[in-house]
Structure formats: structure tokens, C-alpha cells
Image (cartoon, helix red, strand yellow):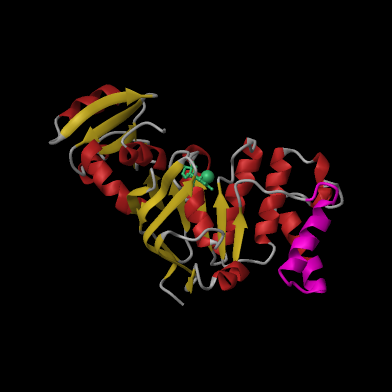
């Protein structure tokens, strides 16, 4: 098995039609380690769906290479699809068939045996919270229910790699929470999950690694820690201290430390931004006050996204 679950090199995709050419991917190199939740973050039209389509063998790259689970995406896509579950941007089910029948049909296409299939269908419907709707026709399903069924479809063959393209689009907060919980369960069982999204606040925080793309080019790639480092260097180290009743004295003392960029009060807590890591010094200072909590505030994906994408979404 390859070291990485997904590995691309110099991936280029050019769409050509009568009106001209679109370079959807412009030399993308990504590496997704095994067993992580990996985010593919970028604004609309940045190439996320194109990249996913190549990984699952629905599109051919114009140039470059891509390997998934050790198989080549062009020559061995059949092997990849046996082991990969995909939640596409839009899933079309047979509306006159029930949720159960749709999954049964898809499972047969995938060659899952009859007995095994029944057990799996009931299991995945339970996982996505659709058990009660197993025998209801898909025709009456809301967007959220269809999205849950699409996730059930992706989980059906118990895939080693789960690929979710904009999974929370059009979901209510409850549906979004269900997606997050499920992804965490899937990863705990040793699987890998790739999530594409431009809605970082909804699902971004469950990712431990990410590739940020813009106009088909990679602008950043790595683990949350790796990507945080340059940002923290630029923005400063942020801390928050809760010391009810001692705020004024604490503010005064903190301001005396070396390398302080900014000290402010946020929700009655002291917020400190410093040029360097002053965690140790703050902890010593805290010993002399009645401090309820002292924490380092790590950057969120949202902040990192703004930083690396250079601000602005479109
Ligand atoms: N089948 C296609 N034919 C022509 N252009 C396409 C096709 N699919 C996507 N594109 C173009 O490629 C670019 C990337 O699209 P896409 O991969 O769908 O981005 P994202 O999923 O990040 O929104 C866009 O400019 C889009 O218009
Ligand atoms: Mg897309």
C-alpha cells in the first residue's frame, strides 16, 4: 500500500468547448495521509469538483498523475471505485423507488451479495438517521433527506476512502451535525475522508489537514499545525485569560511583558496578542492572580483560509 491514500503530481485539467478553454486545475500536487479528515477548501469554481472527478475516474486529467489507494486514476479506476465511497455534489435517485430499493439497486451494481446487502442497507440507513424512511418513496424527500440517502449510498460498500463533495450544502444545522459525527466515526475506524467545501464554518473544523485551492492552483497544503505556523508568526500569538475581579491589575502586569502587540478586554477576559510565545510567562504571572483559565487561542480554518486565500471568497 502506498504511503498516501491520495497522491497527485502536476495535475492539470483543461476543459475545451466552443467558447474556448478553461484551465480548471493548474498543476496540483496533493498528498493525503491515511486515516485523516482532509479538507479541500476553495471558493466556487476553484476546481474542487474537477479534482474529485479525476480521483474517482469520472474525468481524465489533461496531464499529470493521480493515485488513489495505490492505484492509478486513469488505468485502474475500477479498482479505486471498489474501495471508494463518493458523495457527489448532486445525487440523482430513482424517485418512484423507496430509499431501501434505491440502495438495493446500487448495491447490486456494486456486486454486494444479497444477504450482506440487506444487513448493510439497514446499517447505513441507521447511520444517517433514515431508518424510519426506508420504505418511503424518494419522491417526497427534502434536500436534507436526499443528502442523507446520498451519504448512505457512499457508505454502502464500507469504503476505505470516503469522498464528500460539498456535503453540507443545503443542510439544516441538525443535518450538518449528523455529517460531522458520522465523519468522525468513519475516521475512528481507520478510514480516510476527503471533504470539499467552501463553507468552512460548517464542517471545516473537523479537518486535521487541508489543501487550499484558488483558480486551480494550490495556495497552501498541510496539517493544521503546519499551516498555522506562518500565520501565527504573522498575526502573533493569542492568549485569553479569565481572572474575575483582577482584570485591571492583570492588564497592567501583562503590558509590561516583552513583545506584547495588543492587550484588550473581550467578554471580561483579557486577550493578549504577542510577537512571541509567552505562554510560560503568562502561566507564571497567573500564579500570582486568581486566574480561572489561561488558554492559547489557535487559529481556525476560517482565519487560515482568509490568510492563505488573500482575503475575499470569489
Ligand atoms: N464539464 C465542464 N466543462 C467546462 N468547464 C467546466 C466543466 N466543469 C467545470 N468547469 C469549469 O472549471 C472550473 C472549476 O470548476 P469546478 O471543478 O466545478 O469548481 P468547484 O467545484 O471548486 O466549484 C470552473 O471555471 C468551471 O466553470
Ligand atoms: Mg464543486
Q: Relative to the observer, which residue lies in front, 281 or 77?
A: 77
In the picture provided, is 174 more to the left or to the right than 221?
A: right
Q: Nearer the viewer, residue 209 or 82?
A: 82
Q: Is residue 162 magenta?
A: no
Answer above or below: position of 94 versus 246.
below
Which residue is nearer to you in this view: 70 or 3? 70
Q: Which residues are magenta?
A: 94-118
- Identify the residue shown where x is 55% and y is 45%: 166
Q: Identify which residue, 89 or 221, lies in the foreground.
A: 89
Q: Is residue 95 magenta?
A: yes
Q: x, y (%) of residue 135?
A: 87, 51
- At horizontal 57% and vertical 52% (from top left) the residue drawn is 164
Is residue 237 shown left or right of residue 294?
left
Q: Residue furthest front?
A: 18
Q: Farthest residue in the bottom direction?
A: 1
From this view, report whether residue 250 is shown above or below residue 286: above
Left or right: residue 108 compared with residue 274 = right
Residue depicted at 24% across the width and 33% down the height: 273
Q: How many marks?
A: 0
In the rendered image, residue 216, in percent from the top left (x then y), is placed at 39, 47
The image shows residue 28 at horizontal and vertical percentages of: 37, 56
> Which of the 4 image quarters holds residue 272?
top left
Q: Quadrant of the C terminus?
A: top left
Residue 156 % position (x, y): 70, 63
Residue 122 visible in the current orientation? no
Give the dominant element type of the magenta stretch: helix, strand or loop: helix
Q: Can you see residue 48?
A: yes
195 up-or-down from 35: above or below: above
Amino acid at each position: 500500500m502506498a504511503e498516501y491514500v491520495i497522491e497527485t503530481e502536476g495535475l492539470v485539467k483543461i476543459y475545451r468547448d466552443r467558447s474556448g478553454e478553461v484551465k480548471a486545475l493548474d498543476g496540483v500536487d496533493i498528498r493525503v495521509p491515511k486515516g485523516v479528515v482532509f479538507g479541500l477548501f476553495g471558493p466556487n469554481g476553484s476546481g474542487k469538483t474537477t479534482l474529485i472527478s479525476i480521483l474517482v475516474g469520472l474525468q481524465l486529467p489533461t496531464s499529470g498523475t493521480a493515485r488513489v489507494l495505490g492505484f492509478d486514476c486513469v488505468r485502474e479506476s475500477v479498482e479505486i471505485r471498489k474501495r471508494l465511497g463518493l458523495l457527489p455534489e448532486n445525487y440523482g435517485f430513482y424517485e418512484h423507488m423507496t430509499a431501501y430499493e434505491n440502495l438495493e439497486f446500487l448495491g447490486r451494481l456494486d456486486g454486494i451479495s444479497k444477504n450482506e446487502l440487506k444487513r448493510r442497507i439497514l446499517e447505513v440507513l441507521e447511520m444517517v438517521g433514515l431508518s424510519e424512511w426506508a420504505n418511503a418513496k424518494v419522491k417526497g424527500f427534502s434536500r436534507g433527506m436526499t443528502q442523507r440517502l446520498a451519504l448512505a449510498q457512499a457508505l454502502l460498500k464500507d469504503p476505505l476512502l470516503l469522498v464528500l463533495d460539498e456535503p453540507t450544502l443545503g443542510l439544516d444545522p441538525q443535518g450538518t451535525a449528523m455529517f460531522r459525527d458520522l465523519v468522525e466515526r468513519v475516521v475512528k475506524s481507520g478510514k480516510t475522508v476527503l471533504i470539499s467545501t467552501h463553507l468552512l464554518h460548517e464542517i471545516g473544523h473537523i479537518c486535521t489537514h487541508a489543501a487550499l485551492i484558488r483558480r486551480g492552483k494550490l495556495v497552501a497544503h498541510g496539517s493544521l499545525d503546519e499551516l498555522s505556523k506562518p500565520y501565527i508568526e504573522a498575526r502573533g500569538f493569542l492568549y485569553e485569560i479569565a481572572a474575575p475581579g483582577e482584570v485591571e491589575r492583570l492588564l497592567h502586569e501583562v503590558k509590561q511583558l516583552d513583545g506584547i502587540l495588543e492587550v484588550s478586554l473581550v467578554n471580561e477576559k483579557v486577550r493578549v496578542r504577542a510577537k512571541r510565545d509567552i505562554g510560560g510567562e503568562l502561566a507564571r504571572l497567573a500564579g500570582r492572580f486568581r486566574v480561572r483559565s489561561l488558554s492559547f487561542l489557535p487559529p481556525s480554518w476560517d482565519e487560515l483560509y482568509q490568510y492563505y486565500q488573500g482575503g475575499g471568497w470569489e
